[in-house]
Image (cartoon, rainbow, N blue to C red):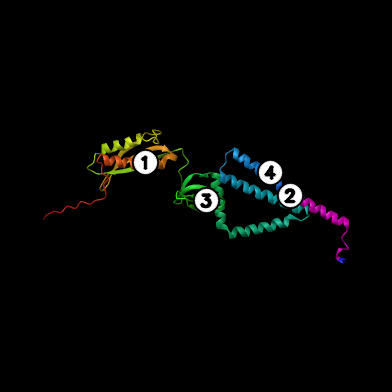
């Protein structure tokens, strides 16, 4: 009981008010942060910000504002935050040294999000891996492949790799090389190819008309290259359709697709 002799009613009330003030700051601050996050989220939707970039900004704002609220509550309790901030700074430096590789990925994620090298939903090739961008977070970029696998690439690798974005333009050019025998009529083969292209509803005449020309001579075949433009979402469908239709037309018109062969000539001495 002797330990409680110095405690007065006014002291308890004063301490209770301080606790109440800190609690009000925490509670009101939390709801204020939630309101701000919702407001920012609606604003980002109106300007159609990339989903991954939106999540990144909201996460940073959420953490920063909650730290400010917590420090304000500690100040209300009479706790000096100067020493706490110094200790946190030292801890941050120690953690940064221990996680320098991870920090490289975080820096890469920030660069990718801010420079918009690609966006969520784009079909890209990064470091040899192809797929649709599912998410870009602070540490990793996640791709979903055509066969429904997820490939997770560290942002430190992604930001320093060769990136091919197949979704950045509305149209793509489809290039296909067909091989015919040296004894076949190349003009007839070119006409068959162009007829198949012109009769396909997905082929476009802009920005250039379909192109079919002899472009090389192999060991066993003549190369004919087809170039045709299409909408990016029709690329694969058009490619598969043309391969099937032109192969069928070649067979019907006696145009051969040769296999590798070697002619051996024996000379009598």
Residue 37 drawn above or below residue 77: above
CA gap, disc 4 and disc 1: 53 Å
Q: Determine contact: label 4, label 1, CB under 8 Å.
A: no
Residue picked out by circle 1: 241
Q: Which image quarter is the C terminus in? A: bottom left
Q: Estimate the spatial distance between the alpha carbons at disc 4 and disc 2, rounded to whole Å.
A: 12 Å
- Name which of mark 2 and mark 1 comes first in the sequence: 2
Along the horizontal axis of the image, is 77 left or right of 67? right
Span shown in magenta: 3-25
Compared to residue 204, the image places residue 94 above or below, namely below
Q: Are marks 4 and 2 in contact (CB under 8 Å)?
A: no
Left or right: residue 11 versus residue 171 is right
Q: CA distance from mark 3 to mark 2?
A: 35 Å
From what the image shows, is residue 192 above or below residue 132? above
| SS label for mark 2 | helix
Kindly identify which residue carries mark 2.
27
Disc 4 secondary structure class:
helix
Identify the residue under disc 3: 141
Left or right: where 62 falls relative to 112: right
Q: Earlier in the sequence, mark 4 or mark 3?
A: 4
Q: Is residue 156 above or below residue 165?
A: below
In the rendered structure, which disc, 4 or 2, sits on the residue that comes first in sequence? 2
* Image depth: mark 4 or mark 3 in front: 4
Q: Which residue is mark 4?
A: 35
> Looking at the image, which residue is at 67% across and 43% down?
36
How many C-alpha atoms fall within 10 Å of the one at disc 3: few (<14), some, or many (≥20)? Answer: many
User: Can you give x and y, in whole percent of width and height, for residue 158 in the image?
Assistant: 50, 51
Q: Earlier in the sequence, mark 1 or mark 3?
A: 3
Q: Residues within 10 Å of mark 1 (few under 14, many from 20)?
A: some
């Amino acid at each position: 009981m002797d330990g409680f002799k110095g405690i007065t009613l006014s002291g308890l009330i004063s301490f209770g008010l301080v606790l109440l003030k800190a609690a009000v700051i925490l509670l009101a601050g939390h709801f204020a942060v939630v309101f701000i996050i919702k407001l920012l989220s609606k604003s980002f939707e109106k300007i159609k910000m990339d989903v991954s970039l939106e999540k990144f900004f909201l996460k940073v704002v959420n953490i920063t504002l909650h730290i400010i609220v917590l420090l304000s509550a500690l100040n209300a309790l009479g706790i000096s935050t100067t020493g706490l901030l110094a200790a946190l700074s030292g801890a941050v430096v120690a953690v940064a040294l221990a996680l320098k590789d991870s920090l490289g990925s975080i820096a890469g994620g920030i660069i990718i999000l801010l420079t918009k090298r690609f966006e969520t939903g784009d079909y890209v090739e990064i470091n040899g891996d192809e797929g649709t961008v599912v998410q870009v977070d602070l540490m990793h970029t996640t791709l979903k492949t055509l066969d429904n696998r997820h490939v997770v690439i560290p942002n430190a690798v992604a930001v320093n790799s060769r990136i091919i974005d197949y979704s950045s333009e509305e149209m793509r050019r489809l290039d296909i090389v067909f091989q015919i025998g040296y004894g076949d009529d190349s003009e007839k083969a070119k006409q068959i190819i162009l007829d198949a292209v012109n009769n396909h509803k997905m082929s476009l005449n802009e920005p250039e008309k379909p192109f079919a020309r002899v472009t090389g001579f192999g060991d066993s075949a003549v190369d004919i290259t087809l170039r045709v433009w299409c909408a990016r979402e029709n690329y694969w469908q058009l490619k598969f359709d043309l391969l099937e239709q032109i192969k069928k037309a070649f067979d019907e018109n006696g145009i051969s697709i040769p296999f590798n062969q070697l002619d051996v000539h024996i000379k009598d001495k």
